[in-house]
Image (cartoon, rainbow, N blue to C red):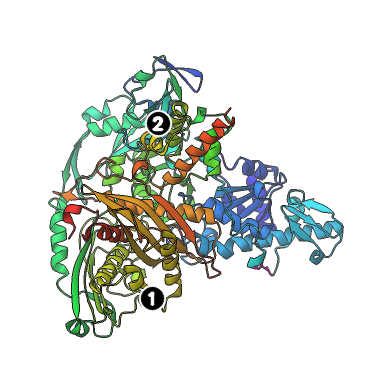
Amino acid sequence: MISFSVNRQHVNLDVDPSTPLLWVLRENLGLTGTKYGCGMAQCGACTVHLNGEAIRSCVAPVSRAEGKEVTTIEGLSPDLSHPLQRAWLAEDVPQCGYCQSGQLMSAAVLLREKPRPSDEDIDQAMTGNICRCGTYPRIRKAIHRAAGMMSTGGAK
Amino acid sequence: MSTLQMERREFLKFSVAASGGLLIGLYLPGTSKFAVAEERSGNAFMPNAFLRIGTDERVTVIVNHSEMGQGVYTALPMLLAEELDADWNKIAYESAPVDPKYNHPVFGMQITGGSSSIWSGFEQYRNAGAAARAMLIAAAALQWNANPATLRTESGVVLDGTNRKLSYGQLAEAAAKMPPPANITLKDSKAFKLIGTPVKRLDTPEKINGKAVFGIDVKNPGMLTAVVARAPVFGAKVKSFDDSRARNMPGVRKVVAVPSGVAVVADSFWQAKGARDALRTDWDEGAMHAFSTTEMMQQFREQAKSPGKSVRRDGDPDGALAQAAQKIEAVYEVPYLSHLMMEPLNCAVDLRADSCAIWTGTQFQTVDRAAAAKAAGLPNEKVQIHTTFLGGGFGRRATPQSDFVVEAVHVAKAAGVPVKVVWTREDDMQGGWYRPAFLHAIVGGVDASGSPVSWRSRLVGQSIMAGTPFEGMMKGKEYDPASVEGVDDLPYEIPNLAVESHKAEVGVPVQWWRSVGHSHTAFATECFIDELAVLAHKDPYEYRRVLLTKHSRHLAVLDLAAEKAGWGKPLPEGRGRGIAVHFAFGSYNAQVAEVSVIEGKVRVHRIVSAVDCGHYVNPGIIAAQLEGGAIFAASAALFQELTFENGRLQQTNFHTFPVMRMNECPEIETHIVESSEKSGGIGEPGVPCTAPAIANAVFAATGKRIRKLPIRMTEAV
């Protein structure tokens, strides 16, 4: 039995502890916003927060989450109110949308650590997240926009 | 009243092209909750197949093209909402079921491809909106005892001269009793309020909170997950397999043989994948067991030495070449490429004795349904496809053989349970249906003044159409139009021109990849015209201008891109600019790339892309498609290549088939030409110019020519 919290809700699961967290989230918990893209920490589509740190859930065994807090895209905000979500809407970022959960979860950690990130900070934090549709220029703009909202008190 | 009865009644009452019964069972979570409620209430107004207006004011647009990122769930509703005078805040979208009434009006089937959704829907969706508007006005006129001609509409309400108002929701029930209009008058384009504006995408909210449902997210009651062991070499057949270990692994329910290999069906993906990897399968590898792309390209080079099938012949190319003041020969080569959608292939199937329901992200509903019906042993009408969001398509999800759909039906049939077949990234990359490798051997000559007098392009590559149900599109030609598109209509004024095509017979499954033939023809032709310009000691931009005087739309985008990029202005040391212009899918695009090369590595700093796509609908989405198209193409130009040795693909995942990342992404500027010409495409036209613009910029920066993709400075000449 493995116990951890997901989006502030406690869960107890009887699963093989070596199963990647990604598949436990998607299949056991029905949280399909976190995506499978590569299975080897190459693309970032599966990015979630483990105790506030961005991790690639496709290579993290669920046992790593024992006793910890997991946040997925479904837990970023209840109502699209996170500054990043508002900025994503304003910049019309997504195309196919498949990678965007991972992009947002990586960006959320960046903004928490660097509230006014430079372009180099964005490169460093976001380079692990592939977007095949090529939304990078808009992601960059949206991160800057979200940072602006937060500094002017737009954050919750 | 049940949904079915209500819809039958609606159908009988109106002789419009509606058969609402097909809307039953269509449920895309997150988008159609309103719709389901309306249908149950029995009050929805469904004047035609493309919309439904509920008493709750919701206007649901039924979209007959698949949303794979290109924005059809926004742009097609815009067309309808424009003529309906709907309140844009009340618009919802829903994917169409498979039905002939949702066919592409030109291609005659349900398909998303060829960058055609906007131009094919431009009147279809406007007509649907205008027809509904007329019925709403008729209903209001009846209620007010007024002349319909005196009424007007605005943002979801009908008004009269005295400011009486009735909302579309209030009128929905009454409008459903009105006959459809005999004649429809569409708005003059000057009256457009929505069309031409950068309306925000409707699908963004559900794509940033994890709610959007892609094929891989589909979960149905009792559904198991399958992972398939497929042939390691194209055409290989299973000789035998040992599933003794796999069968006893946790969660594994069945191991079944299917035509494409061996499927493991389990409770979860991870269990199915683990057991699939534990299978021991012995393959009869067949004719492709020794296949090598190195040898294949050598054969292509040999083939290019002899004349191919004639595609186009103007004047006397050989005679003119013999008399040219200067000549140049170049061989351009491009590799096989994977579409590499972020969402790997998948398909869920619930096969019953008398029905088959399929959930998948497909671009090819009509073809997939027919293929699935054949595999299931059912008539077409017993098969329904629920089109989910597509996590990228780029052509891969429109397979003439419907490979991923047919396979899933076979797995469901053999296993006897509802299944979702999920492909791993490696399965997806190794599964075939690539952009074909191509070779272009070009010879050209210029006269004493530098003007080109002769050009001969000889292409070698596999046909996409041959051997598919689309072979008919070759129309008795000896070459595949999809191989030569973009060179057969070379716009430059060259009096003596030949285009020849060699069909290569190779057993690698190939397919359309975002911009199809243009993805390689633009590279070869736009690099070669650049080489001719240099041979003539002319500026590459000015050289093109002179040769395009009869092509005003090419010229306009070329000038716009050059102007915005600051063509001719000084650059920091080590940087170079390259230019390219191309017509594809009804649209004209020109790009200027700015690059530097440091320690053999090409860095793209900036791309300026100008497009003329005719009358445009949503400039925000167009800009996004140009940005994305350039990045998609730059990934291929800089990094991507599929190679085979001993019949086996050497690439497996993103580390061996890289995609451009944030830190490598250039600044991209986009510019749109104002135009009232017929709408062209936008999903693909932004791709072709990027590779040649980058390659020409590398030459400007280094003096080295790139004739092979992906770019490797060690192979530059």
Q: Residue at x 33, y 34 (%)?
A: B265
| B377 or B91: nearer the viewer | B91
Q: Disc 2 designates what residue? A: A47
Q: Which residue is mark 1?
A: B548
Position of the C terminus of chain B, as image quadrant, is: bottom left
Q: Position of residue B646 (x, y in %)?
A: 13, 48
| In the displayed structure image, the side of residue B207 where residue B651 appears, left or right | left
Q: Which residues are magenta?
A: B183-188
User: Disc 1 is attached to a residue of which chain?
Assistant: B
In-front residue for pair B389/B24:
B389
Among the 4 quarters of the image, the one containing residue B565: bottom left
Rendering coords of residue B398 (x, y %):
39, 55
Q: Chain of mark 2?
A: A
When the figure is inspected, residue B33 is found, relative to residue B50, above or below; the finding is above
Q: Which element carries disc 2, helix, strand or loop?
A: strand
Residues flagged by tags 2 and 1 on a common chain = no
